[in-house]
């Protein structure tokens, strides 16, 4: 069954869309990742114009994180103070990202920028994940290996404008969380991702937050930044495709439920290696498209469309 | 029936010409619904003749269908620092979003170059380049690339010999509108050609519209972007939260 996407102005098979949403939802249920970083490039592969894929991907992030943040709020595992600082940074970052996105659109280079950011980020994340899971696998076999120290005193703790974050039990400058939030906001606007894959490690290693509030707080920030970014894309370049979003979201929520159940039964380490390889494969495919001489060096953009 | 009557009245009222064309379409409305997969249009007609058939020349028919024009940019990629990026551009002031030409014979043979220019029949002449690259032959390569890409997508079509003409009187052809066509008013022209010259021409229209829901969404997105953004967020929250609530309910 074909579906006509009114904003992207293309017809796509409905089951492909449900499959993309469902598959990524399953992975996110299994690994606890948001999945925005997989949905957007998969949308490129099925022919959705990158601006529409990014804006709609960020809309989908709202759907996939909303129920998580509600659950964490109920369990009181959200540091609202820290969340607010991260959110302020995120909103600033989102505005910068949108500005840059629209500038690049006008210059005709947005597709390239989006693809390049994906190659870089997916390559780095996939590489790190692979390294981390291989190390974990080794540690499981050889338990006497040295473990990494979690909390270190670094330059981060010497910055001015310190603020007390009660729930996290931190007394640190507001600049590091603002900057982390801002970076994530920029990524949300340009790549259509939630940014949890950057924010969670930054919160643990850079800010030194206790792990029990990290997920809830990052989801809190992501939900609001993604909602704001969706609105910005809708208002400034009309690239959110509601029809596309609904199919992705329906596939995604069903997939996530299945994924959570599978994740409980499977061995985490091997699966994490698989996810890392999948992420690297997606990065490789996009990189290949940029590096390999294209079969058609001309392309057409219609002004006012994507 | 009434349409035919009006057509006939028009024909009677018009000054007499040796040969005139009367044409019809199988449909003059195309709806881009959720499951639109392209559409086939039958264009048919007859030649009305007051005088006996001339014997020294052959009659030819040309049908063109043209979609709404769009301002377009054609990009050419070049390798910069190892990656392929859009490097050169040529603006096109107006290029039809869809253009099909069907004829009873090879276009070059049946139509003189002058007549082609005046009536803008071949695809190349339906595209208006803007000023841009200095070198006109460079400009032409961009326009040719535009035509080549759109031909590959089925958006530009040329069917030499695609019209059946019977006893120099009845003709018909089928054109496929691919699933990627855009909204707007499409113009269908039917031309009679003798000795390389156009001797009669009629024009008719096909309205291509998004179906109700798609049209409403597009209009909302462009006219009320805040409202549209709010709708997108509402749907995301509704489905995201609703679905997990539903699954919790099912589990208990």
Image: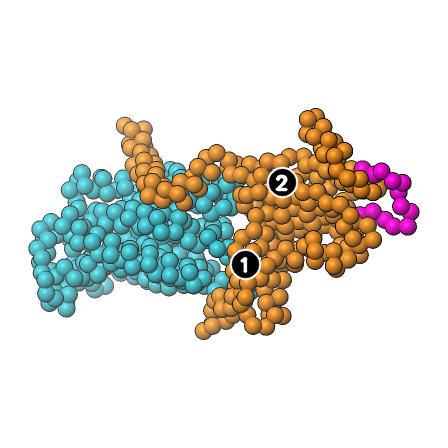
Tell me if I can see residue B108 in this picture.
no
| Chain in orange in the render | B
Image-quadrant location for residue A129: bottom left
* Colour chosen for chain A: cyan
Circle number at residue B93:
1
Residue A174, x across and y down, in percent? 14, 59
Residue A149, x across and y down, in percent? 17, 63
- Mark closer to the chain start, 2 or 1: 1
Residue at 46% from the left image edge and 52% from the top image edge: A304
Residue position marked by numbered label 2 in the rendering: B205
Circle number at residue B178:
none
Q: Residues within 10 Å of mark 2 (few under 14, many from 20)?
A: some
Residue at 29% from the left image edge and 46% from the top image edge: A227
* Span shown in magenta: B47-61
Residue projecting furthest to the top = B1
Q: In the picture provided, is A32 more to the left or to the right than A75?
A: right
Image-quadrant location for residue A76: top left
Main structural element of the magenta stretch: helix, strand or loop? loop
């Amino acid at each position: 069954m074909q579906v006509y996407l009114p904003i992207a102005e293309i017809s796509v098979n409905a089951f492909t869309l449900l499959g993309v949403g469902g598959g990524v939802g399953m992975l996110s249920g299994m690994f606890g990742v948001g999945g925005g970083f997989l949905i957007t490039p998969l949308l490129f592969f099925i022919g959705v114009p990158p601006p529409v894929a990014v804006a709609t991907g960020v809309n989908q992030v709202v759907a996939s994180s909303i129920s998580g943040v509600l659950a964490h709020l109920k369990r009181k595992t959200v540091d609202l103070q820290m969340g607010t600082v991260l959110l302020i940074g995120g909103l600033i970052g989102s505005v910068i990202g949108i500005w840059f996105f629209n500038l690049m659109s006008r210059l005709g280079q947005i597709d390239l920028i989006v693809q390049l950011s994906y190659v870089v980020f997916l390559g780095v994340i996939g590489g790190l994940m692979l390294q981390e899971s291989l190390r974990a696998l080794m540690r499981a076999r050889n338990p006497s290996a040295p473990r990494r120290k979690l909390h270190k005193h670094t330059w981060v703790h010497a910055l001015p404008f310190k603020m007390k974050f009660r729930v996290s039990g931190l007394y640190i400058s507001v600049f590091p969380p603002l900057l982390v939030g801002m970076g994530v906001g920029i990524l949300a606007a340009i790549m259509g991702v939630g940014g949890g894959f950057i924010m969670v490690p930054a919160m643990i290693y850079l800010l030194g937050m206790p792990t029990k509030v990290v997920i809830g707080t990052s989801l809190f920030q992501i939900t609001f930044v993604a909602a704001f970014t969706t609105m910005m894309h809708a208002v400034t370049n009309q690239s959110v495709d509601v029809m596309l979003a609904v199919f992705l979201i329906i596939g995604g929520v069903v997939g996530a439920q299945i994924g959570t159940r599978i994740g409980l039964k499977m061995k985490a380490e091997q699966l994490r290696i698989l996810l890392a390889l999948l992420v690297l494969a997606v990065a490789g495919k996009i990189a290949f498209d940029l590096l390999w001489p294209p079969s058609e060096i001309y392309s057409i953009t219609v002004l006012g469309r994507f | 029936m009434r349409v035919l009557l009006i057509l006939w009245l028009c024909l009677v009222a018009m000054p007499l010409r040796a040969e005139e064309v009367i044409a019809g379409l199988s449909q003059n409305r195309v709806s881009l619904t959720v499951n639109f997969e392209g559409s086939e249009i039958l264009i048919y007609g007859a030649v009305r003749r007051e005088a006996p058939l001339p014997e020294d020349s052959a009659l030819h028919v040309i049908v063109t269908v043209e979609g709404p024009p769009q301002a377009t940019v054609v990009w050419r990629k070049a390798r910069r620092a190892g990656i392929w990026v859009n490097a050169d551009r040529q603006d096109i002031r107006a290029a039809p979003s869809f253009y099909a030409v069907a004829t009873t014979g090879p276009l070059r043979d049946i139509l003189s170059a002058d007549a082609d220019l005046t009536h803008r029949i071949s695809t190349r002449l339906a595209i208006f380049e803007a000023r841009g690259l200095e070198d006109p032959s460079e400009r032409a390569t961009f326009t040719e690339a535009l035509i080549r890409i759109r031909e590959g997508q089925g958006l530009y079509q040329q069917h030499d010999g695609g019209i059946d003409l019977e006893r120099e009187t009845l003709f018909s052809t089928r054109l496929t509108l691919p699933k990627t066509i855009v909204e707007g008013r499409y113009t269908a022209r039917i031309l009679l050609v003798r000795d390389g010259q156009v001797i009669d021409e009629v024009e008719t229209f096909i309205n291509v519209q998004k179906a109700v829901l798609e049209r409403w969404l597009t209009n909302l997105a462009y006219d009320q972007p805040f409202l549209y953004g709010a709708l997108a967020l509402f749907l995301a929250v509704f489905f995201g939260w609703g679905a997990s609530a539903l699954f919790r309910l099912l589990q208990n």
